[in-house]
Structure formats: structure tokens, C-alpha cells
Image: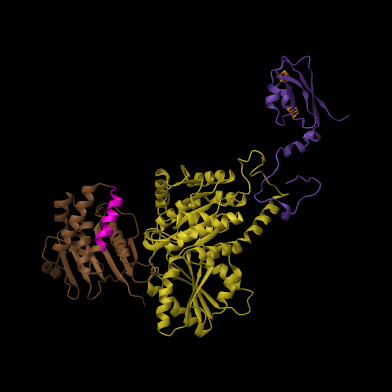
């Protein structure tokens, strides 16, 4: 283990180097460009054995990944925003074919208007494609998560997306600890694909037409495989904790034991919110934080157990569903808690779209609000757009 | 997966990845019973240009040593492409009704 | 609340504000600190005013927001004083370091700073003299370390030298030139 200073992108590229995938096919896009740019240096310098495929679009990038994965390779790529959107149809193809590809992603808003900064609309818009999603809070976590995600993906044949917040994490240099190459290799182990198109002794048909008689059965089987991801993830995360001393649960709770109210948030904002929690706790206020790290599959039971303790919960959504009913985390959280006997009052704060800075005082204001909701026992305002001009 | 044509599998029996895990399963699809018109090949008239062989969508024209030897009625679905592609000078394939 | 030492770097696109922040961050890490170094999030265009930041602490850093109340402000180009409010949010008792030909007193007056240290060094002159190019960023690091006292000089210098060696892969005259320039800035910085 050694201490290094790396940006989120450098940390992800370094994890990719240590994973040493068979194939990386990618197309550059701000703010994820550096991930493959740095990785291609590793390729050029002979530090990895990877076949690097430079393609002409993200659609082709993921298509090439699909081909390489069907051929039995360990495969990774990287993208962001519009790039993920362009990969959209291939996301379903990779997942449906059970190809454990891993994407090192940087969360960036989707056009229009054109913007290169952070929000979570890209991955939230892909949440039904059949990929595991992990949202990271800092560079250390981005590095660690990529390794854990690869192990989980290969154990379950479910592909994975690991993401950082555009610029806030992708371009911010932080101190982190990295493992030895050999430790990473031992942890992920040799990749044993379930099938390989290069296995000429056992020829198979990949991706055939599948109509009314079998499509539904294949989808049902895929959903069932997805239900096993959470356990596989937790096993990988615990094994990784033994190796590194860093444990990342699918859902993290911070100072929640005796809290009356909590914020439910993801990404770098959740990390920042811990600072606010400490501050308010110093003032004697019973506030806590629940951090959503995995949003596919949903850690439903953990979320229920965590959130039903509180009187009021503020969900912080860094994207909107355009359903005129708040963000995706809010909607799904309310859905999960619907059957619970005891449940908190839940409000939504859509924030930080297009990289709008979220200040400590913004987060403190959310705590003020939910304490008020808890005290009054009712919600005055269900959905708030936080930090946008024209709203109070 | 074994193709069980009599009984459809449940989702629990399927191999992961929607793949068909044995080769040449199409051999078991006998499309011959789709036929309402039957191509009849005349070895006397045939000039072995192989136009019919390359055009048949079901690979039902049998060839040995670059010579047509007949039609595989297990797979021939009676589309008539072979008869229409056969050069008029030869007219070696005639379509007749299956109905007796 | 955890104690943070925060720095804001002002420069123009191409002057290396981000690189300076990264080098300073890494040097700080070598002395055992937890660090962040990040540019004002966005694409840089040559000549346009840009900002970069550092956040240092003795423990792990959890805040991921822009720096609004810096302990130290570094201005890589004095022409920015005309167009940018460089002292915005500067903490009481903090410091502002400017690359300029002027005396510290003059800059202090110009900025209207009363409750923070004002330091000046002619980094452009040093850069042009030693490096033959107007690249004031690394030069300013020397002055920065001296003015803030945030880092131990020897280990900071060693770290910066190591990073430059990595970056310039064996181009000895560039690496040695930078080190010489950094030392000169350390010696010449003037405080008011
Ligand atoms: S009728 Fe159609 S299927 Fe049959 S042999 Fe001719 S071309 Fe092939
Ligand atoms: S197209 Fe006609 S002539 Fe040509 S090979 Fe077929 S049957 Fe013979």
C-alpha cells in the first residue's frame, strides 16, 4: 500500500492499470477523457497487456466491448454524459448477454443546454439498462470501487458502472492509498468467462433473435441474476476491506443511531454533508446522513431499515425525472417505503444541476427544513429546487 | 440448451446470456413441411451453373463435386427462387403443386 | 469542525495556475497532510482568467465544494488585479501573494487590504531570467511556501523537484532551472 496524490480520473485510470483488462475500447469525452488518455499511456508504455481499441464513437466503443467480452475477455471502458447516452442501446445488449463489462464513468449533465459539469442525469437515465451502479464520494472510493465492481460484475455476470462527480471529483487531486499491483491481481483473480466465442470446441450462437416464446423467460432470468448482485457485492466489498482496511457498504449510514432527521444523498455531496452533520451535532442537533452508494440494484431492505428510523428525510437528487414529481431517488425511495408501518415524512431537494456549486450552508438549510417538517409533523413543500435563482 | 420443441423451458432452465449453447440447431428445423409448391429438378436439362444453389435461402440444393445432385425436401420450403433463377435456356426446375 | 488550510490561485489560462495547485498539493502531501487540489471546474482557454484551489488538512478531507474563504490567495499575473476581485472572501489574518514589480506596500494600498498579509515577488522577472520564459507558476511556489509557512521548506522543495523530474523526464536544465527559480523567489519575496 502506498500513499499517492491523484485526481478522480487518475485514480480510476490507475485502478484500470492494476486490473490490466484484456480489452479497453473507448472514445474520449470531457470530463472522462483523462481516464482513457492516461490509460492509453500505460498501454503505450507497455505497463499493461491490454488491447486498446480507439473507436469513432461511444456507440462503437461499447459495441467493441461487447464483442471482446463475448470473446471471453476482461473488458473495461470509460465515458460520461452524452457518451453514455450514445451507448444506451448497447448498455441493454451488454447486460442482456450477461457481459461483465465495467465502465469508469464521470457523471455529467445531459444536453440541452450544453454543459460539461456534474449532475447525475446520465446514469439515472440509464438505470433500467441492467447495470450495477455505484456512486463514489471521493478519489479513494473511485479507485477502490472500480476494483470491487469488477469482481462483483464477473461473479454475477452483471455489468457495472462506477461513477464520480464531474470536475468536483474527476479533476480534483486528493490523497489516497493504492494497493500493490499483485494485491489487486490476487483480489480480482483470473477471469473465467462463462462462455467464449473463441472456444472453437464448443461453438454457440450469441445474441440470437428471441421472440414471444422465449424473450420474457430470458428477461425474467436476467432479473433474477440481478437479485444476486447485492450479496455478491457485499462479499466482494468485505473481502476488499480485509485487504485494504476500507469497507464500502451498498448503503452507508453516518451518525444515524439517535437521529430524528436525515439527508439521503449520493456522490461528493454526501461526503460534504458529513461535515455539516458534525457541525450541527456540535450544536446538539440530532441529525444524520444516509449515503446511497449503490442505486442498481436497489438495496431495498437496507434502505427501508435505515430510513424508517427517522421522523423526516430529505432526499437530495442531482437529477430530475421530468415527471413533474421530483428526482428519481425521491420517487423510488417513497415507493420502497410505501408498505412500511412507520415511515418518515419525505421531501425532495433537486440540486446541483449542471454543476451548480452546493455549499455547506445549502446543506445546513436542508437540515433546518426537515427539522421543521419533523416538528410540524407535516410537509409544507414536497419538492424544492435548491440553489436555483427564482426559487426561495 | 437443448431445443425441446415439444415443451418450452421455464426461465429457470435457460442458460445465462440468451445464447444457444450448441451448434447447428437449425438442422432440427425441418422447413420442408412449409411447402405448397415443389421444385422438381431435371438432371438432363441442368447445365450445373449453380445459380439455384447460391440463391436458395434454405440451402436445400444438394451439390457434390460442383454438380447439382438434387433437392433436399426436408428443408426446401417451396419458395420457387431456384426455378425463377434457372436460365431460360435450361429451365431445369419446374414447380408443381404439392396437393395431390 | 475540522481545520482546513485553503488556497485560491488566480492566473490566466496557460500560466499554470492548476499545475501550481497540483504541485503545491503534492508537496503538502509529502509532509503528511491530507490534500485537495482542483481547478475552477471547467475548460481553460489561454488568456482567460482562471482559478485553482488547494485544501489542506491533518485528517481526511470530506468537503467537496469550491473554496470561498481562502487562507491564502496567490495571483500569478498582476494584470488580474484590475479586473478580478482577488481578495474576495480572504480570511482575516490570511495572506495574499502577488507576482508583481511593485513594492508590497503599493499593492497593499491598491487592494485596500488591512487585515491580511500582502506579499510580493517578481516571479515573471525570475522566470524570464532563469527559465527564459514567462512561466511564473512554479516560481511562485517558493514564495508561497515562505509566506504561508504551511509547509516545511526542504521536503516541499524535494517533492516539487521530484514531480518536475517526472514531468520533464530527464530534461535536466528545465528541472534545475525551476529549482533555482523557486529558491530565488523564496529569498526575494517581500511582505507588507
Ligand atoms: S423452392 Fe426455394 S427452398 Fe426449395 S430448393 Fe428452390 S429455392 Fe430452395
Ligand atoms: S439454375 Fe438450373 S441449370 Fe443452373 S444449376 Fe440450377 S438447375 Fe441447373
Q: Is residue A191 left or right of residue C186?
A: right
Task: Tell me the quadrant of the picture where the N terminus of chain A can be found.
Answer: bottom left
Q: Which chain is brown?
A: C
Q: Residue at 31% across / 54% down in the picture?
A: C44
- Which percent across, then down, holds residue A84? 49, 52
- Per the rendering, the colour in which chain A appears is yellow
Relative vertical location of residue B16 with respect to residue C114 in this rendering, above or below: above
Q: Nearer the viewer, residue A284 or C164?
A: C164
Q: Residue furthest right?
A: B100
Q: Is residue C137 left or right of residue A334?
A: left
- Which percent across, then down, holds residue B52? 71, 23
- Which percent across, then down, holds residue A70? 59, 45
Q: Which chain is purple?
A: B
Q: Main secondary structure of the magenta part?
A: helix
- Which percent across, then down, holds residue C23? 29, 59
Relative vertical location of residue A25 with respect to residue B62 in this rendering, above or below: below
Relative vertical location of residue A267 with respect to residue A154 in this rendering, above or below: below
Range of magenta residues = C155-169
Q: Nearer the viewer, residue A267 or C138?
A: C138
Q: Quadrant of ligand 2?
A: top right
Task: Tell me the quadrant of the picture where the C terminus of chain A can be found.
Answer: bottom left
Q: Nearer the viewer, residue A201 or C104?
A: A201
Q: Is residue A69 left or right of residue C115?
A: right
Q: Residue at 56% across / 70% down in the picture?
A: A333
Q: Is residue A126 left or right of residue A174?
A: right
For the question of whether residue A374 can be seen, the reply is yes
Inspect the magenta stretch and tell me whether residue A280 lies in it: no
Q: Residue at 50% across / 79% down in the picture?
A: A261
Inspect the magenta stretch and tell me whether residue C164 lies in it: yes
Amino acid at each position: 500500500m502506498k500513499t499517492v496524490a491523484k485526481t478522480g480520473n487518475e485514480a480510476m485510470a490507475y485502478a484500470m492499470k492494476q486490473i490490466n483488462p484484456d480489452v479497453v475500447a473507448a472514445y474520449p469525452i470531457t470530463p472522462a477523457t483523462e481516464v482513457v488518455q492516461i490509460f492509453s499511456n500505460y498501454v503505450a508504455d507497455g505497463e499493461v497487456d491490454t488491447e486498446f481499441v480507439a473507436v469513432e464513437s461511444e456507440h462503437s466503443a461499447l459495441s467493441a466491448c461487447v464483442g471482446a467480452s463475448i470473446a471471453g475477455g476482461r473488458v473495461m471502458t470509460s465515458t460520461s454524459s452524452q457518451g453514455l447516452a450514445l451507448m444506451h442501446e448497447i448498455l441493454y445488449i451488454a447486460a442482456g448477454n450477461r457481459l461483465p463489462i465495467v465502465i469508469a464513468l464521470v457523471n455529467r449533465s445531459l444536453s440541452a443546454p450544453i454543459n460539461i459539469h456534474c449532475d447525475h442525469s446520465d446514469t439515472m437515465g440509464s438505470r433500467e439498462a441492467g447495470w450495477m451502479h455505484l456512486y463514489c464520494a471521493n478519489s479513494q472510493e473511485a479507485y477502490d470501487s472500480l476494483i470491487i465492481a469488477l469482481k462483483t460484475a464477473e461473479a454475477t455476470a452483471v455489468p457495472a458502472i462506477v461513477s464520480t462527480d464531474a470536475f468536483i471529483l474527476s479533476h480534483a487531486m486528493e490523497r489516497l492509498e493504492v494497493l500493490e499491483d499483485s494485491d489487486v491481481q490476487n483480489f480480482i483473480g483470473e477471469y473465467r468467462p462463462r462462455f467464449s466465442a473463441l472456444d472453437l470446441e464448443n461453438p454457440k450462437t450469441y445474441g440470437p433473435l428471441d421472440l414471444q416464446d422465449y424473450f420474457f423467460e430470458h428477461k425474467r432470468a436476467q432479473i433474477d441474476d440481478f437479485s444476486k448482485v447485492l450479496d455478491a457485492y457485499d462479499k466482494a466489498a468485505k473481502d476488499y476491506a480485509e485487504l485494504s482496511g476500507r469497507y464500502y457498504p451498498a448503503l452507508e449510514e453516518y451518525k444515524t443511531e439517535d437521529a430524528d432527521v436525515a439527508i439521503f444523498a449520493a456522490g461528493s455531496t454526501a461526503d460534504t454533508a458529513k461535515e455539516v452533520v458534525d457541525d450541527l451535532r456540535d450544536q446538539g442537533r440530532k441529525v444524520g446522513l444516509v449515503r446511497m452508494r449503490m442505486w442498481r440494484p436497489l438495496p431495498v431492505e437496507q434502505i427501508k431499515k435505515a430510513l424508517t428510523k427517522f421522523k423526516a428525510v430529505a432526499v437530495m437528487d442531482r437529477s430530475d425525472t421530468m415527471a413533474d414529481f421530483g428526482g428519481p431517488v425521491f420517487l423510488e425511495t417513497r415507493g420502497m417505503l410505501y408498505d412500511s408501518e412507520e415511515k418518515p415524512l419525505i421531501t425532495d431537494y433537486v440540486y446541483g444541476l449542471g454543476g451548480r456549486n452546493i455549499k455547506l450552508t445549502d446543506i445546513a438549510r436542508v437540515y433546518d427544513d426537515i427539522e421543521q417538517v419533523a416538528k410540524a409533523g407535516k410537509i409544507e413543500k414536497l419538492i424544492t429546487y435548491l440553489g436555483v435563482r427564482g426559487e426561495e | 440448451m437443448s431445443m425441446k420443441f415439444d415443451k418450452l423451458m421455464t426461465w429457470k432452465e435457460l442458460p445465462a446470456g440468451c445464447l444457444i449453447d450448441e451448434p447447428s440447431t437449425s438442422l432440427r428445423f425441418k422447413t420442408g413441411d412449409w411447402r405448397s409448391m415443389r421444385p422438381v429438378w431435371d438432371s438432363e436439362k441442368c447445365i450445373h451453373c449453380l445459380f439455384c444453389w447460391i440463391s436458395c435461402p434454405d440451402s436445400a440444393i444438394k451439390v457434390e463435386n460442383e454438380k447439382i445432385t438434387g433437392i433436399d425436401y426436408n428443408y426446401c420450403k417451396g419458395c420457387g427462387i431456384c426455378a425463377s433463377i434457372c436460365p431460360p435456356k435450361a429451365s431445369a426446375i419446374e414447380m408443381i403443386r404439392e396437393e395431390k | 469542525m475540522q481545520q482546513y488550510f485553503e488556497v485560491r490561485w488566480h492566473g490566466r489560462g496557460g500560466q499554470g495556475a492548476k499545475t501550481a495547485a497540483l504541485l503545491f498539493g503534492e508537496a503538502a502531501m509529502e509532509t503528511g497532510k491530507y490534500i485537495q487540489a482542483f481547478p475552477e471546474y471547467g475548460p481553460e482557454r489561454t488568456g482567460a482568467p482562471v482559478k485553482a484551489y488547494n485544501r489542506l488538512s491533518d485528517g481526511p478531507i470530506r468537503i467537496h465544494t469550491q473554496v470561498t474563504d481562502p487562507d491564502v490567495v496567490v495571483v500569478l499575473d498582476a494584470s488580474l488585479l484590475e479586473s478580478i476581485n482577488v481578495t474576495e472572501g480572504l480570511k482575516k489574518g490570511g495572506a495574499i501573494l502577488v507576482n508583481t514589480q511593485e513594492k508590497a506596500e503599493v499593492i497593499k494600498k491598491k487592494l485596500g487590504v488591512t487585515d491580511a498579509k500582502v506579499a510580493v515577488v517578481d516571479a515573471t522577472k525570475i522566470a524570464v531570467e532563469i527559465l527564459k520564459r514567462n512561466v511564473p507558476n512554479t516560481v511562485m511556489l517558493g514564495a508561497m511556501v515562505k509566506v504561508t509557512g504551511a509547509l516545511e521548506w526542504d521536503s516541499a522543495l524535494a517533492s516539487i523537484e521530484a514531480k518536475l523530474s517526472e514531468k520533464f523526464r530527464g530534461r535536466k536544465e528545465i528541472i534545475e532551472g525551476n529549482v533555482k527559480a523557486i529558491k530565488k523567489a523564496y529569498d526575494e519575496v517581500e511582505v507588507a
